[in-house]
Each structure stands twice: as C-alpha cells, then as structure tokens.
Amino acid sequence: MERKRLYAKGMNLMAALALCATTLTLQSCDDDDDNRINVPQELQNAFDALYRNVQRLEWETEGNYYVAEFWMDNLEKSAWFDRQYQWVMTETDLPYQQLPQAVRSAYEASQYASWRVDDTDMVERKQAETVYVIEAEQGNSEVNLHYTADGILVKEYADGTGRPQGGSDYLPSPLPDKVKSFIESRYEGARIVETDMETGWLEVDIVHEGKAKEVRFDNSSYEWISTSWDVMPGQLPQAVSDAISANFPEYRTDDADFVETPDGNYYLIELERGNEDRYVRIAEDGSLIG
C-alpha cells in the first residue's frame, strides 16, 4: 500500500512538472512567484508576429506592462507590451563585439576608452531611434553612455545622475502631438532618440544635422523652453572666447553648450580653476548674461 501511495504521488508530481514545462500561460511553477500571469491569446499573437524560434520564453508583469523574457539567436531579450498588447520596447543583452562598428569606434575614441566595459545593450523602442548602451566602470566610478547606430553620443549618465538601470528605465515617455509637430517644424529631419518626463519639463533628445540636441518643453502646456547641444571649446566664436579671456583669465574652459530659447540664444560655459567650477552665460556677441 505504501509503495502504491508513493507511486501515485510520484506520478502526480511528474504530471505537474510536465504541465509547467508545456503551458504558455504561466511564468513559472514557483508557488511564491507573485508575477505569475495568464497570457491572453491576443498578447501571445502579438509576440509571435514579432519573434519566431525563441527559447526559454517566460512572461511576467512590470507595472502596466507585460514583459516577455526569452532567448533568440543566442541573445537574451526582454520584449515589453502595453495593456492593449501593443509592442513598446525590446532590450537585448548584446556582446560588445556585436555593437555597430560606429558605436565601438566612438566609444574607443572617448575619454572612457580605458574603462572596463561592464555591460552593453541594444534598446529598440516604438517611435524612437534604437540606442546602444555601454555601461563602463573604473574603480568606484561608473558611466552609462547612449549611442545611436551611427555612433552619436546622445546621453551620458555619470555617478549620481539618475543613471538608468535597464528595464522600465528605458521606456520612453509619450510624445504629445504638439511637441512632435514643433520638432518636425523647427528641426526638419530630426531623429527622435529619447523622451523623458522630468520634474518641470519634458525632455526630448534628438539627432539633427549630425548633432545630438536636447529639447525641453513645459510638462503641462508643452511650450518650448530651450534646445541645447555640446560645442567643443575650440569651436567657440571668437567673441565668446575673447569674453572668457577678458573676464575670467584665471579659468580654463572645461565644457560649452549652445542654448536656443524663445528669448534669444547664448553659450553656457563651464569654467574650471583648480577644484572650483563656475558656469557663465555669454551671448553670441560676447556680452555676459546675468
């Protein structure tokens, strides 16, 4: 009798494991897994339309999103879908050598070339440019660099600057029609790369005329606030360079941005003297602002 009970118990366990291995409706057979979900057929259909021949597919929920974690072509991927079963984003854990050549060349020519590359990802998103993310570290310092496929650096997150950790951090904020129309009109041909809702403004990163530009809008009215982009100190107008030399002779120009606003344009200059940093605004004609 005892042997029969053990046999029956074993058969029940085997059946349960088989069910777990074959069903598409559960993330796992862990009874403590709070993210276990039922996968609607519409969602599975949406996934199947994008990805074929996948391995180790598992579903979970993350906030208001369904997330499919799987392997494809020997790469680990996470595909995100909204509650209407629309694809939103896919994050792929990509080996460094599989990054586009332009991205690797840009990184290897940067100030971080000697840092250790900790992780690299490809992030594909709906209605936004694909970005390639390189996470690098040196000692206790870390940096997160976002490149377009053609090697343009659009975002740089250093220590303590809200560096994205992957997953939901890469989800783009919705882009209102008013904002999209403004960008299309003022920056013809611009490629939208990042959209982030910050405190007080909506920030849209674009690539326009070969430059990475950061465009800011009021987050309630969506009125344009400013657009800025990096300028090499050696490429500053002579009037601006002369103003720096005349007014701040003991400082070295560490960084410079050109800033467009509805009220006029100026250069935002970061000056450095020893351990002291100072920011000044200089108009295009060389006059100091503020």
Image (tube, grey):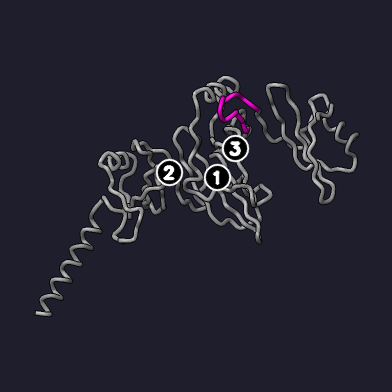
Q: Residue at the spot x=31%, y=50% of the render?
A: 37
Instruction: Classify the position of the C terminus by image quarter.
Output: top right
Marking on residue 199? 3
Sequence-wise first label, 1 or 3: 1
Q: Is residue 217 magenta?
A: yes
Q: CA distance from mark 1 to mark 2?
A: 21 Å
Residue 55 seen in this snapshot: no
Residue type marked 3: Thr
Give x and y (percent) for residue 270.
77, 40
The vertical placement of 200 against 107, above or below, is above
Badge 3: how crowded within 10 Å, few (<14), some, or many (20+)? few
Q: Which callout, 1 or 2, points to the residue nearer the camera?
A: 2
Per the image, the residue denoted by label 2 is 90
Q: Amino acid at mark 1?
A: Gln
Do callouts 1 and 3 mark residues in contact (Cβ within 8 Å)?
A: no
Q: Give the number of the disc on residue 101.
A: 1
As drawn, the label of residue 184 is none
Q: Name the side, left or right, on which 105 lies relative to 54.
A: right
Q: List the single residue furthest toward the top.
A: 185
* Along the viewing direction, whichever of 118 and 289 lies nearer the viewer: 289
